[in-house]
Amino acid sequence: MEERCGIWQLEQLIAVGGLGEVWQARSADGELAALKRLHTHLLRHPAARALFEHERRLLNELPRHPGVVHGLGQGERDGRPWVAMRRVQGCDLRQIMEGQTAARGVAPQPRALPTSEALQVVMHAADAVAHLHDLGWVHGDVVPANLLVEGALPVVVLCDLGVSRRQGAAGPVQGTQAYMAPEQIRGEPWTAATDVFALGVVLWELLAGRRLYHRGPAWRSMQAIMEEDVPSLGDPALDELVAAALARDPARRLPDARKLAQSLGS
């Protein structure tokens, strides 16, 4: 039996996350979309519904940018909200980093990208994040899994706007622990520099071929961010660039993603 949400026919389950499931969907004229709908068990959870409504409002209302996923419509079916988004054909940066050829039952190992490629990838990601910063928003969860790779690197598309908030706004501690800026961990207001920190972590990991702050339990990852020094990459110029993005004090960090993109391109 065909299942539809508005004009979209659901074809294939793509991913399942904490908030909802994402399907490949197709309209009658053949247009593809990624359609996200809230988990049924979260329909009675006001906080989950609020996050979902927040994300789909941003997807459909923010000015479009080629490096940021945008909305193609929204609605409800049987009381279950959904949002259709641009379908990015490819995989996410996490999969690229871990490799996609690991044998079954063998844990994938991170791998380094060539320096020029890593710099290009993060420059493209920073340009996408800068679009949000220019509009007064902070993404708050710039992690490899939320950076989609369309075609060949370095074409990168930013997704998952669920925890995004206005610059300067305070709120609950949200994000992915191993990529959180210190001010996120402390529950302080976010600024554009908050996203710069996450981009700095991604950059270091792409260059080093290993995780920077992953320590297992979330509290240990956050402790590492607050206390541990960043290992050298063996290249003074790269170390200086990473240090400018990973300063614990946001006032000493590159102020926004636009400045980071310019530094990467110089």
Image (spheres, rainbow, N blue to C red):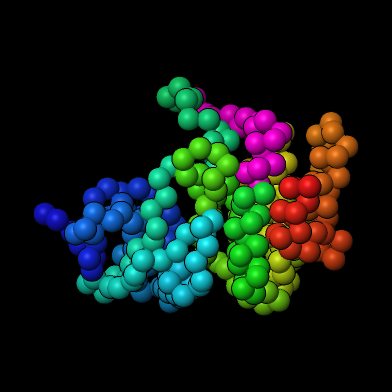
Task: Tell me which residue sits at (40%, 45%) in the image.
Answer: 89
Task: Tell me which residue sits at (67%, 30%) in the image.
Answer: 114
Q: Quadrant of residue 34?
A: bottom left
Pick the front one: 89 or 74 = 89
Pick the front one: 119 or 175 = 119
Pick the front one: 40 or 64 = 64
For residue 241, say whether it is visible. Answer: yes
Where does the image place residue 213, in percent across and percent down from the top left?
71, 44
- Tell whether position 48 is magenta: no
Q: Which residue is most to the top? A: 103
Q: Which residues are magenta?
A: 106-122
Where does the image place residue 195, in percent across and percent down from the top left?
68, 60
Q: Which residue is most to the front? A: 266
Q: How many marks?
A: 0
Task: Tell me which residue sits at (60%, 67%) in the image.
Answer: 132
Q: Which residue is most to the left? A: 1
Where does the image place residue 203, in percent across and percent down from the top left?
70, 44
Drawn side of residue 99 relative to residue 169, left or right? left
Where does the image place residue 157, in percent across and percent down from the top left?
52, 52
Q: Quadrant of residue 138?
A: bottom right
Task: Tell me which residue sits at (50%, 44%) in the image.
Answer: 149
Drawn side of residue 242 relative to residue 109, left or right? right
- Tell whether position 120 is magenta: yes
For residue 171, say whether it is visible. Answer: no
Quarter occupied by the N terminus: bottom left
Drawn side of residue 7 relative to residue 47, left or right? left
